[in-house]
Image: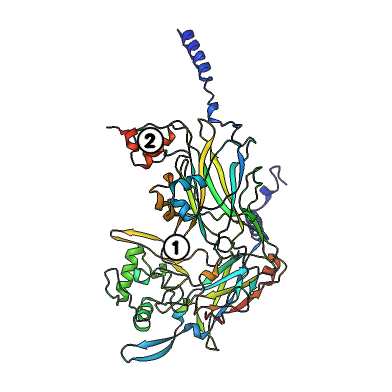
Amino acid sequence: MSPRGVLFDMTSATRAALLLAVVAQACTYDEHLPQVDIKGTVIVPRAAATRVILDDRTGVEAEVVDARFIGPVYLGAYSDIRFDLENYPHPATGPIIGGELGNTYPYGGGTVGVFDFACYTSTLCKVVTGRYADFSSMLDFFSNTLDQPIVDEQGAEVQSPDYFRTSCFDLFEYTEDAELLFLAGEDGLDFKENADGDFEAEFTMWRVNYHPGMKVWGWMDAPDGNFDFTTCDPTNGQQFNQYSASFTTGSSHIDLLNFPSNYIDIGDFVVSEPFELTYEDADAFRAAAPTFTLVYDFPVEK
Amino acid sequence: MSRLLLAVGFVSAFVACDRDNEQYFPQPVAEYPGVVDLGDFVPLTTSDWADPSLRVEKSIYDGLGKNAVPGQWGGATFTFQGTGGTVCVLVDPEAVFWVQSVDARSPTDGYLCEDDNYDDGDLDLEVGLSAYYNGTPGVSIGNFEQVYEDSLGNEVVFEANECQMNGQRGQAGAHAGRATPEFCEIDTSLHPGRDYTVLLRLWSVPADDYVVHYAATVVEIEAGESCADVIAAVSADPECALPNEGTGDGFAAVEELYCAGELDSLCTEAE
């Protein structure tokens, strides 16, 4: 060994290998976080994607099945789900304060699809991510299926995908379609029809505080006849003030998982059989890496 | 010469030591304890509220000094029973207005108005079910924070103060600044007959006498009305709904001028 020490006697290759080993070892450090990512599949019934549409030209009503009717699908992790609080399964609640319903105090949550602003105020609170492949798909759906054509800020119907794109790029100062979250592309659509004719999508609930015995439950916000959603707050979201235009882009209400019954309405679909997480702790959950299926099978009728 | 300057500086330094600003540190006042419980209060009816003399007669007029125990909140509490409807709770601490020229955020330069900068107090209003109040009335001031244990044994701290006031940007949980009235609606429909505690948290006492005088009341609200509606029915300014909460020399006269919209007679705008 030289008088300068062992490291100086090594070849540069040996030193590099040693350094790599030290760095790689750092990657194996387990923080034992109490939060977990819960993954699985949500299934919404075919009825949630079905509407009876009146064809103005023929005067004939026709049943239309389209995944673009599926609203945001919410998931939450709770201490318990009860069947005696509402007309549908609902998370257990804390004390009633004032006239407010009790808070459910969720441990975490997630969604399949979120509200996004599609560049014109006529689309405010009507567009959910993961439902539209491209501009043409959205224009077609609003014009021909909903009979609610998208109009620009001057009230003129938007018919051209290129004009739509130009408006979006101009408003947001974007340069790529990929920057617009409401455009999923053909491969990025959330829901696909399964063998039973229902629609299913993958979900991830990020960083949920893990408590053994907690139950995952959720609901799908179905649009009303005007294609509005109760879970969207038009006064929330990004504020735009440009020349004479002044508007907010809309976003979901901030307490959906805390007070679900404030937002669940007739036509929505609720999970009747929540899945329970029985692993001892977050580490055991991570080791098992389970996936779950959550079926939104309970139609809210009153 | 340098010795002379040194001596002058030395003397000046000692003179500076004479300014200890002790007067800005409130001292307890024997006649006005810092923690007070005023007992039960019967909410005013709308007809009581509409009558100027009954409004004053049936409301609370009192004063609060500094809590004698250093580092602990001072304040007053009283209780009322849930009416089954909505009530308006109002507190009006002295004084009558805030002189604009000393407002730190948006002072009006050159605004001249006779005012005592040291006679303003501040009380913050909190209201909730008495079962959730964790202070000891008349002994120590608490709050409405409680712990909820869910079915899996996890504990969550929740806030049971139902007196929600919105700030200038609409955010909940705000309080008015010093000398400014605070009010809020309390929905008692789910708890008729249950005791509610009103907490007037002592935020600051005037530096002139270390006592904040105040007026406070609870008024029944008709269906569809708000607290602001009830106050507006008797006064264009919440400050004037419960008159003469201060006791200082000339306070009543100043408040009367303020409420009559004639305060400018005491003020002049600089050129």
User: A144 left or right of A23?
Assistant: left
Mark 1 chain: B
Foreground tag (2 vs 1): 1
Q: Name the amino acid, label 2.
A: Ser
Q: Compare residues B134 and A128 and report the one nearer the observer.
A: B134
Q: Residue tagged by mark 1?
A: B224
The residue carrying pointer 1 sits among few (fewer than 14), some (14 to 19) or many (20 or more) residues within 10 Å by Cα, namely: few
Count of numbered labels shown in the rendering: 2
User: B178 left or right of B28?
Assistant: left
**SS for tag 2?**
helix
The residue carrying pointer 2 sits among few (fewer than 14), some (14 to 19) or many (20 or more) residues within 10 Å by Cα, namely: some
Mark carried by residue B101: 2
User: A191 left or right of B157?
Assistant: left
Query: Looking at the picture, how far across and down is residue B77, in whole percent?
Result: 59, 46
Could one spot residue B111 in this view of the protein?
no
Which residue shows up at 46% across the image and 51% down it?
Answer: B49
Which residue shows up at 52% across the image and 81% down it?
Answer: A301
Q: For the N terminus of chain B, which image quadrant? A: top left
Rendered view: A276 above or below B168: below
Q: Compare residues A85 and B63 and report the one nearer the observer.
A: B63
